[in-house]
Image: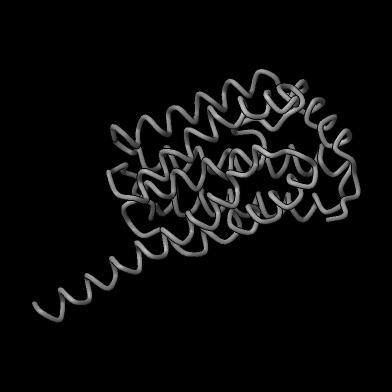
Amino acid sequence: MDLPFTTEQFLAVFERYNLAIWPLQIVAYALGVVAVAVTLKPVRRSDRVIGAVLAIFWIWIGVTYHLVYFREINPAATVFGAFFVTQGVLFLFVGVVRPRLVFRAGLSASSMLGGLLILYSMVAYPIIGSLLGHGYPRSPSFGVAPCPTTIFTFGLLLWTRARPPTYVLAIPLIWSAIGFSAAFTLGIYEDIGLPIAGVLGTALLLWRDGRSIGTRVLRRRHA
């Protein structure tokens, strides 16, 4: 895959970006912990809180990372930024304004995969990056960079009980393919979690939700 920038330019953008927005990385981790905590132990309006966290992450990355920083070396960042802002608005709508997402962790296969993806995005991802020689600040950071945040997003979506609207999955799935293909070319191998999250996460969600709909239809027929 031919890219209009080198690995050094890519990591240099992250270095400038991370240093400029510090200490928002800590805020992002705090928001991530809150989202996980209220999923494991729901409180009043917890689903709206999680929807708001996801909306903040995606809109921030779209505007600040893609449109302000990444566009310096990649003209396609304009399109990427628009995608991320759109996804953030979708989360704002279906997660906060007219909430259709109900987050509850369980013991199903999808829930367990969701937990693994969340741990990977918040803990394993930065550790692997450091071991590969591009640790902070020359690395994507959770909550403020596209790839670990996309992995985290799929993790939370796998913790939903009510069926997520299918259109909510489209942009994260597309980014999992775009982000990984570029990252693999650049040697950002911690992004191996992206295709796992995108392909397996989407497949599990569609299979799980399709099976749930089928079960409800059968129950109605036998009622």
Q: Which x, y percent locates residue 96?
A: 44, 47
Please tell me which residue lies in front, 17 or 184. Answer: 184
Q: Which corner quadrant of the image does residue 10 belong to?
A: top right
Displayed quadrant of residue 198: bottom right
Position above or below: 203 against 73: below
Rendering coords of residue 210 (x, y %)? 35, 69
Which colour scheme appears in the figure?
A: one colour
- Residue at the outermost top position: 23
Q: Report the quarter where the C terminus lies.
A: bottom left
- The image quarter containing residue 136 is top right
Most extreme residue toward the bottom is 221
- Who is closer to the viewer here, 137 or 131? 131
How many numbered tags mark residues here?
0
Question: Which residue is located at x 59 percent, y 32 percent?
Answer: 125
Q: Quarter holding the N terminus?
A: bottom right
Residue drawn at (22%, 70%) of the image: 215
Q: Residue at x 82, y 26 (%)?
A: 16
**What residue is rendered at 40% in x and 42% in y?**
48
Residue 72, placed above or below residue 221? above
The answer to whether 86 appears left or right of 136 in the picture is left
Left or right position of 31 against 67: left
Residue furthest left as drawn? 223
Residue 74: x %, y % from top left: 86, 47
Q: Nearer the viewer, residue 39 or 199?
A: 199
